Amino acid sequence: MSDNLISYLNDRIENKNIIKHMLATKACMEGIYDYLDSKGTNNLGKKEYWSMAGLMHDGDYTNDIPESKQGVQITADLIEAGISVSEEVAHSMAAHNAATKVEPESLMDWALFTCDSLTGLIVASALVHPEKKLKTLETKSILNRFKEKSFAKGTRREDIIKCEDKLGINLEEYVNICLNSMQSIARELGL
């Protein structure tokens, strides 16, 4: 299924950096799921749902739709293309964008809401790192950049930090989970 979804995105989205962002988010969602599962967390749902929500959440990120529909329109588009979307995935994709007014509720919703912006901070941190590679980037470097409000100004730090209250994962561990997840697909990300 993942290959079909990636083909769908490649056909639809011209900006390949958005696709890389969605691949990074998918990896983070899978890493967060595995972490929570290893801690015995209940009510996680299906890992493939977490993966799909991460991969497809910005699949409607175009100039053609208003911001208030970004994260919502993708569900209709996928269904129209003959791709099944669970209610859980549809809700998470809608809830990742505050402009939709759909509130995050489940752990999957909150994971997507909090890691969406973190992927950008991690990429920006890698790009200013001497090697410009994820493999040599360390969690402490990202945390230092997190504190630096002028760095990667578009990063929604207030969303990321909600990982502590909403997922029960402290910020350092959360950044580490997402960094490791993104490092595992560094070649696909070009980093």
Image: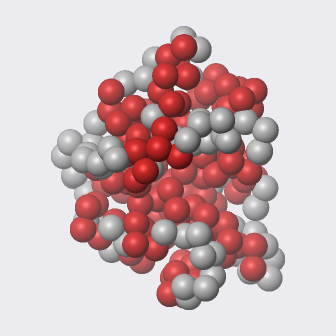
Image color mode: secondary structure
Task: Please state, as top left, top right, bottom left or bottom right, where the N terminus lies in the image.
Answer: top right
Which residue is at the far left? 42
Residue at image location 66% in from the left, 40% down from the top: 62
Left or right: 105, with 152 as reference point: left
36 in relation to 157, above or below: above
Q: Nearer the viewer, residue 92 or 179?
A: 92
Left or right: 67, with 47 as reference point: right
Task: Please state, as top left, top right, bottom left or bottom right, where the C terminus lies in the image.
Answer: bottom right
Q: Position of residue 140 (x, y in %)?
A: 54, 84
Left or right: 57, with 99 as reference point: right
Residue at image location 59% in from the left, 37% down from the top: 65
User: Residue 102 appears in which quarter of the rendering?
Assistant: top left
Q: Nearer the viewer, residue 38 or 119?
A: 119
Q: Position of residue 141 (x, y in %)?
A: 59, 84
161 in relation to 3, above or below: below
Left or right: 18, with 52 as reference point: right
Q: Position of residue 166 (x, y in %)?
A: 26, 61
Q: Answer whether residue 154 is visible to the viewer in this image.
A: yes
User: Residue 32 appears in which quarter of the rendering?
Assistant: bottom left
Q: Nearer the viewer, residue 138 or 115?
A: 115
111 in relation to 84, above or below: below
Q: Answer whether residue 135 is visible to the viewer in this image.
A: no
Residue at image location 33% in from the left, 27% down from the top: 87
Q: Position of residue 103 (x, y in %)?
A: 29, 48
